[in-house]
Image (tube, helix red, strand yellow):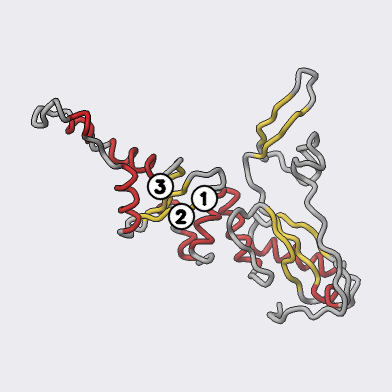
Amino acid sequence: MSEKHPNQPQQPEEPELRRDLPGTDNPHEPWARQEEVGDIYSAEITDEGRIERADKLTLRPMVWIGCLAAYNNGELHGDWVDAAVEGEDLVRSAQEILSRSPEPDAEEWAIFDDDEFGSYRVEQYDSLEHVARVARGIREHGHAFAAWAELHDGDEAMLDGFEDAYLGEYESQEAWGREVLDDLNLDGFLQMGAIPEAIRPYLHIDYEGWARDAELSGDVYTEQAPGGGIYVFSTL
């Protein structure tokens, strides 16, 4: 695949939005044609049995792969493709798209759009094998893997270390610090007889400060989670 950027004489239309997930356009059709048996939803159903709302609990990263020859000639030819597959399967999908191109002997493709990759940024000329690797991790581990992949610019060696490094999702640094330090029973030490009872109520553990210093020291680092919490990763 060429690394050159397309130089089209006229701007084609943008790829169509995905229609396979619940949204404002089809709030009552959460299981559309592109969904799989393994996709899981949390649904709110009215007394009449109508789906009021359906939230997808598993991510399904997809990319819109288009033909560069068609794009250069002012026509948008491509399709949404499931990216959470083996690399050779994603390449095969791109080749199939090119085989249907209105341009004869079309040989080059690019990623024009992506969906459900979380915070990871898919670039137009990324290797499809690499995109598939990231997508499979997101499908298995969710937004936390997307944050990890973006943090390391998709480095293959770092992607393989996700499970060892990921410490979990927490509401805040304080929540993570409290969980770690509670295992040391520090509150119990504060209640020991060596501390005068009159001043015990004024002593407290700065969980947030400890967690912040742990990140500043380089032992861990955090990334924002979509719901407002944080993901915590170990550097050790």
Label 2: state its secondary structure.
Answer: helix
Percent position of residue 186, x then y: 22, 36
Other-residue count near label 3 (Cα within 10 Å), few / some / many at <14 / 14–19 / ≥20: some
State which quadrant residue 94 falls in: bottom right
The residue that appears at 22% across and 28% down in the rendered structure is 201
The residue that appears at 82% across and 69% down in the rendered structure is 98
Along the polypeptide, which appears first: circle 3 or circle 2?
2
> What is the number of the mark on residue 230?
none
Q: Disc 1 residue type?
A: Ala
Percent position of residue 29, x then y: 80, 36
Label 1: state its secondary structure.
Answer: helix
Residue 99 vs residue 184, the one in the foreground: 184
Q: Disc 2 residue type?
A: Phe
Q: What residue is pinned by disc 2?
A: 162
Q: Is residue 192 left or right of residue 96?
A: left
Disc 3/disc 2 C-alpha distance (Å):
10 Å
Label 3: state its secondary structure.
Answer: strand
Residue 86 vs residue 130, the one in the foreground: 130
Q: What residue is pinned by disc 1?
A: 144
- Quadrant in the picture for the N terminus: bottom right
Q: What residue is pinned by disc 3?
A: 167
Other-residue count near label 1 (Cα within 10 Å), few / some / many at <14 / 14–19 / ≥20: many
State which quadrant residue 11 falls in: bottom right
Q: Is 233 above or below relative to 199? A: below
Q: Is 73 above or below relative to 218? A: below
Disc 1/disc 2 C-alpha distance (Å):
9 Å
Q: Disc 3 residue type?
A: Leu
Along the polypeptide, which appears first: circle 1 or circle 3?
1
Percent position of residue 115, x then y: 69, 54
Question: Which one is closest to the eye, mark 1 or mark 2?
Answer: 1
Disc 1 and disc 2 in contact, CB within 8 angstroms: yes
Q: Is residue 163 left or right of residue 135?
A: left
